[in-house]
Image (cartoon, grey):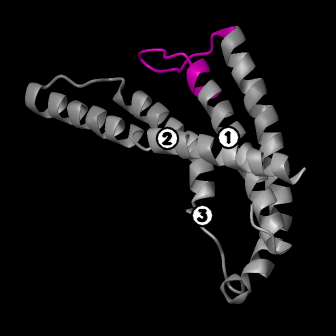
Amino acid sequence: MLSIIRSYVRAVDALNRFTGLVTMHLIFLMIGILLYSSISRTLFDTPVNSVVTISQFLMSAYYLLGGGFSMQENAHVRMDLFYSRWSSRRKAGTDAFTSIFLVFYLVVLMIGAISSSVYAVKTGQATRTLVPYPLAPIRIIMTIGIFLMLLQATSAFFKDLAKARGVTL
């Protein structure tokens, strides 16, 4: 059983590391689009109407697909009034306990994301902007991002549980 969990943790960590490293480059694409829009509007007096929508989509993809990687790297914000003084085993036990609530939250979020994605695909839902962009792609990306965070949360749970018991995965 331990080898299955170890394999799961390694596979999920590798998947989220790859996804995070690829996703982090979306910020450069977004900066390029915003720069193009600024130059187009300022120098050539031709504003690009779709820039805000495209930038919002890219930022959403950046945020959602990078969530699992951020979780893996412990790059999230943490309140540590007492936490910083605890032993590593106690921190791991507390993290394992709170991971249960995170997994529950992500499962509920995942159910909503799937429902939202299915609705967007079935109805052809689009933005209410000058150019009506379909919402299905960003909703599907949202679902994938939440799924990756759910996988990473369960991986973190296993790692923390093992660490709390004095075992390393």
Q: CA distance from mark 2 to mark 3?
A: 17 Å
Residue wearing tag 2: 62
Q: Residue at x 40, y 34 (%)?
A: 55
Q: Which residue is mark 1?
A: 148
Q: Is residue 5 above or below residue 124?
A: below
Residue 98 in the image: state x and y as whole percent: 82, 65
Say whether marks 1 and 2 touch (CB < 8 Å): no
Q: Which residues are magenta?
A: 123-139
Q: Amino acid at mark 3?
A: Asn
Mark nearest the camera among 2 and 3 is 3
Element at badge 2? helix
Sequence order check, earlier mark of 1 and 2: 2
Q: Nearer the viewer, residue 7 or 87?
A: 7
Report the front residue among 149 and 108: 149
Residue 142: x %, y % from top left = 63, 33
Between the residue at mark 1 and the residue at mark 3, the CA separation in whole angstroms equals 15 Å
Circle nearer the N terminus (2, 3): 2
Q: Position of residue 123 (x, y in %)?
A: 69, 10
Within-10-Å neighbours for mark 2: few <14, some 14–19, many 20+: many
Q: In front of the other: label 1 or label 2? A: 1
- The quadrant in which residue 106 appears is top right
Q: Is 10 situated left or right of 157 in this image?
A: left
**SS at badge 1:** helix
Identify the residue position indicated by label 3 in the image.
74
Q: Amino acid at mark 1?
A: Leu
From mark 1 to mark 2, how far is it between C-alphas? 13 Å
Decide if residue 151 is in sight here: yes
- Disc 2 marks a residue whose amino acid type is Tyr
Q: Is disc 3 placed on a helix, strand or loop?
A: loop
User: Is residue 42 inside the magenta stretch?
Assistant: no
Nearest the viewer among 90 and 4 is: 4
Count of numbered labels shown in the rendering: 3
